[in-house]
């Protein structure tokens, strides 16, 4: 090996070209597909634009933001609904999914069948899920009202039309999907759990509950982080199922969510691109704050 | 990664090698990323001078077969092929802005009124004055007015319109001895009587994507109580929504809402219409398109309507809500000559007759079109429109559609759930008015 020309610590031309490609292509993709739209949204949020000619963009400073925060009736209800969505999902379907996973991990009969059945909603496409729940909630011929009628209640409940009720109806549909998702994630974690830890806990005289809360849960910390992040993200970006059950035309009274308000303003015949972008930036800030705070908290403890 | 920590290179000759695989994958990714850019440069499909492209929102069975009949007749006459691209009605509307800016079809279906003028003003449509020169004089002044943009140029070729009214079944009214009311008081009295007879007096279905259907009642209440001029000023954002007169509309509406079919907020308009056909509800404020729901011709013959009742004698029943549908030409048509020929044909009597034959739920706007094939309902509808002093389109066509769909409709449907004096609802709507009507 001639020492001067090709030392192993120097990169050849081919190597450099290869590295430039391997780093450059994803970098370009990231810039073009993630950073450019994100920065464009932020820039547009300080303007008004109807989405047609580029010359139609006019700067307005913080006008969009002040309007949204002080003079946009659906904004604060939407924030409230997003918070409610987060609390509901974190308190009911998520723990329930973990609960199911814990029990299905034991050798009970037909466990494969249960796993499949509970995970099934996650496999179905969202259009199908929306259709199923529309049939259940239909005021005249729906399953729920028919059951209520049969049970002797004459009340005609407008599940998806009543602004006080429809958010809860949608939350139930979303929980139906979310439970299976969490169950599968947690089940995967449990499969990798070292059974000798459980045996040791049993030898020390721990009962089932103690074993779960003192041994299993702390040992599965990486999975827990994923589940919390998934839950928070799903709640903040909640959109699809509400959109489908709302008829696919944007936000409905009682079911306003930040994500829907964005599409209300951007998609449609006369777009308010700037206004919608300002809403999107607000949602981005809230999401970053929620996830950032959580991740910093989690990983700081780990480093210490 | 520092160079010192760089791992030793792969042993040569061990199959494709990690680098080869990684490189191949990135090559694929790069190709995938570049693909849309490259096709965008290609300039789209080749222009065929014998073909006109046509974007249609008539995705339901009746309009779809009607448009098919019209394009077939045109091809037979002119030798030009029509490539129809049908999109679901709601989807078509929602994506119209991006559709018109992308590579739209040459000719596309659209609505008369503010909605047409908006896109004309934005330069997304081609003027059609030369087409109108050939179309001749088969159109009323009201129709001509509806086909022009704010600059006075024609941008629109109308095909048909249809009136909104209060529909009912003749046999039900005959059985129970009901009479079609002419005034608001008679209307409310009739609703009360139906209620006592165990019927749901007014069919109601504005669930899911159908919230627009409540606008029929709103428009008529406003037209009857406050007149056409005030209604149009309100629609164009020129008057305050907290005006006394708008409050009056909600007060009147509140007299009617207790007689609405329950759970309207979760029902589709089609299900509400079906309840009228099944005689479970007594009346429905709806358009003639209700006929598209009818499958049994005996029921079609049993359908009838009365004009929305009079509220203020000063305005009587002088206005009719009759939305007009038709066609526009996109801004850079690929085959302009062919497209204009197609539009000239579409505005003519022959096209209207071909369309009406397949979809009898509309009325031809070209006065030269034969009305011989009209059923009694169509004849009565044509008379209703011919008698009208003012013709309005529909709130979401007379006003900024974004304002209606994201502000007015959520406000009104929420209010319908708990009808109160409406002060809070109207204040909410008013707070957003300036955002949509600045210029």
Image (cartoon, coloured by chain):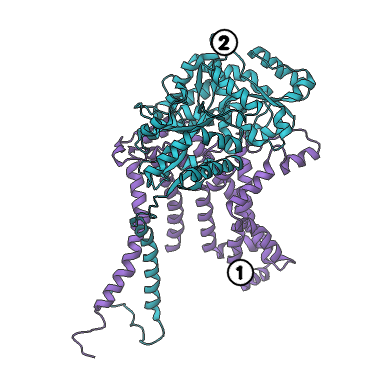
Out of A301 and A55, give the one closest to the viewer. A55
Residue bearing the label numbered 1: A191
Q: Nearer the viewer, mark 2 or mark 1?
A: 2
Which chain is depicted purple? A
Residues under numbered marks 2 and 1 in contact, where contact means CB atoms less than 8 Å apart: no
The chain letter for the residue carrying disc 2 is B
- Up the image or down, B221 lies above or below B36; here it is above
Quadrant where the N terminus of chain B sits is: bottom left
Say whether residue B310 is visible: yes
Q: Can you name the residue that lies furthest to the top here?
A: B314
Give residue B413's position: percent from left, percent from top: 57, 30
At 71% from the left and 65% from the top, the residue drawn is A111
Give residue B287's position: percent from left, percent from top: 60, 28
The chain letter for the residue carrying disc 1 is A
Give residue B432's position: percent from left, percent from top: 43, 28
Callout 2: SS: loop
Quadrant where the C terminus of chain B sits is: top left
Query: For the residues tagged 2 and 1, is the chain the same?
Result: no
Residue bearing the label numbered 2: B312
Callout 1: SS: helix
A292 vs A104, left or right, is: left
Q: CA distance from mark 2 to mark 1?
A: 75 Å
At 58% from the left and 52% from the top, the residue drawn is A126
The local crowd at label 1, few if under 14, some if 14 to 19, many if 20 or more residues have their Cα within 10 Å, is few
Say whether residue B267 is visible: no
Q: Colour of chain B?
A: cyan
């Amino acid at each position: 090996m001639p020492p001067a020309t090709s030392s192993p610590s120097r990169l050849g031309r081919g190597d450099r070209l290869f590295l430039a490609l391997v780093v450059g292509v994803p970098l370009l993709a990231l810039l073009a597909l993630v950073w450019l739209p994100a920065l464009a949204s932020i820039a547009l949020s300080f303007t008004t634009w109807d989405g047609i000619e580029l010359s139609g963009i006019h700067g307005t400073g913080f006008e969009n933001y002040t309007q949204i925060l002080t003079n946009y009736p659906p904004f604060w209800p939407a924030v409230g609904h997003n918070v409610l969505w987060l609390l509901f999902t974190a308190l009911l379907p998520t723990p329930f999914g973990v609960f199911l996973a814990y029990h299905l991990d034991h050798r009970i009969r037909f466990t494969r069948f249960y796993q499949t059945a509970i995970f099934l909603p996650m496999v179905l496409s969202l259009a199908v899920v929306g259709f199923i729940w529309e049939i259940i909630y239909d005021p005249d011929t729906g399953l729920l009202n028919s059951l209520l009628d049969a049970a002797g209640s004459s009340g005609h409940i407008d599940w998806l039309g009543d602004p006080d009720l429809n958010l809860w109806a949608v939350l139930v549909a979303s929980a139906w999907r979310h439970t299976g998702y969490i169950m599968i994630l947690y089940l995967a974690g449990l499969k990798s759990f070292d059974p000798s830890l459980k045996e040791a806990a049993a030898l020390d005289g721990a009962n089932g509950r103690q074993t779960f809360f003192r041994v299993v849960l702390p040992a599965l910390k990486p999975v827990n982080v994923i589940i919390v992040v998934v839950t928070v993200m799903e709640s903040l970006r909640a959109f699809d199922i509400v959109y489908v059950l709302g008829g696919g035309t944007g936000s409905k009274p009682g079911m306003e969510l930040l994500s829907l308000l964005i599409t209300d303003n951007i998609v449609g015949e006369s777009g308010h691109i700037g206004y919608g972008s300002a809403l999107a930036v607000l949602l981005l800030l809230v999401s970053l704050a929620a996830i950032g705070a959580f991740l910093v908290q989690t990983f700081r403890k780990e480093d210490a | 990664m520092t160079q010192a920590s760089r791992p030793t290179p792969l042993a040569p000759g061990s199959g494709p090698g990690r680098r080869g695989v990684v490189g191949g994958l990135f090559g694929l990714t790069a190709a995938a990323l570049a693909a849309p850019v490259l096709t965008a440069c290609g300039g789209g499909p080749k222009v065929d001078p014998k073909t006109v492209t046509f974007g249609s929102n008539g995705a339901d069975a009746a309009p779809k077969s009607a448009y098919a009949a019209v394009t077939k007749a045109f091809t037979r006459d002119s030798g030009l092929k029509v490539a129809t691209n049908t999109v679901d009605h709601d989807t078509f509307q929602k994506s119209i802005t991006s559709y018109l800016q992308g590579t739209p079809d040459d000719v596309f279906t659209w609505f008369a009124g503010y909605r047409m003028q908006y896109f004309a003003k934005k330069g997304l449509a081609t003027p059609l004055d030369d087409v109108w020169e050939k179309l001749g004089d088969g159109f009323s002044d009201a129709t001509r007015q509806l086909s022009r943009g704010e600059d006075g140029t024609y941008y629109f070729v109308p095909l048909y319109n249809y009136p909104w009214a209060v529909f009912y079944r003749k046999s039900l009214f005959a059985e129970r001895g009901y009479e079609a009311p002419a005034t608001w008081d008679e209307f409310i009295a009739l609703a009360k009587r139906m209620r006592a007879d165990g019927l749901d007096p007014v069919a109601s279905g504005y669930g899911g994507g159908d919230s627009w259907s409540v606008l029929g009642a709103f428009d008529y209440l406003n037209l009857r109580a406050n007149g056409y001029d005030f209604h149009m000023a309100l629609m164009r954002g020129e008057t305050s929504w907290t005006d006394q007169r708008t409050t009056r509309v909600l007060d009147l509406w509140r007299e009617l809402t207790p007689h609405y079919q329950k759970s309207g907020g979760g029902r589709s308009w089609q299900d509400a219409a079906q309840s009228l056909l099944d005689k479970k509800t007594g009346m429905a404020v709806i358009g003639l398109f209700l006929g598209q729901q009818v499958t049994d011709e005996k029921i079609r013959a049993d359908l009838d309507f009365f004009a929305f009742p009079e509220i203020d004698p000063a305005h009587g029943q002088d206005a009719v809500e009759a939305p007009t549908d038709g066609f526009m030409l996109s801004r850079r048509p690929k085959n302009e000559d062919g497209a204009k020929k197609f539009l000239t044909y579409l505005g003519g009597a022959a096209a209207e007759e071909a369309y009406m034959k397949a979809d009898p739920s509309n009325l031809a706007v070209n006065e030269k079109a034969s009305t011989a094939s009209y059923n009694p309902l169509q004849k009565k509808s044509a008379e209703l429109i011919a008698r009208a002093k003012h013709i309005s389109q529909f709130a979401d066509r007379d006003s900024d559609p974004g304002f209606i769909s994201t502000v007015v409709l959520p406000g009104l449907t929420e209010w319908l759930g708990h009808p109160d004096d409406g002060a809070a609802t109207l204040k909410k709507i008013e707070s957003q008015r300036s955002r949509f009507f600045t210029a």
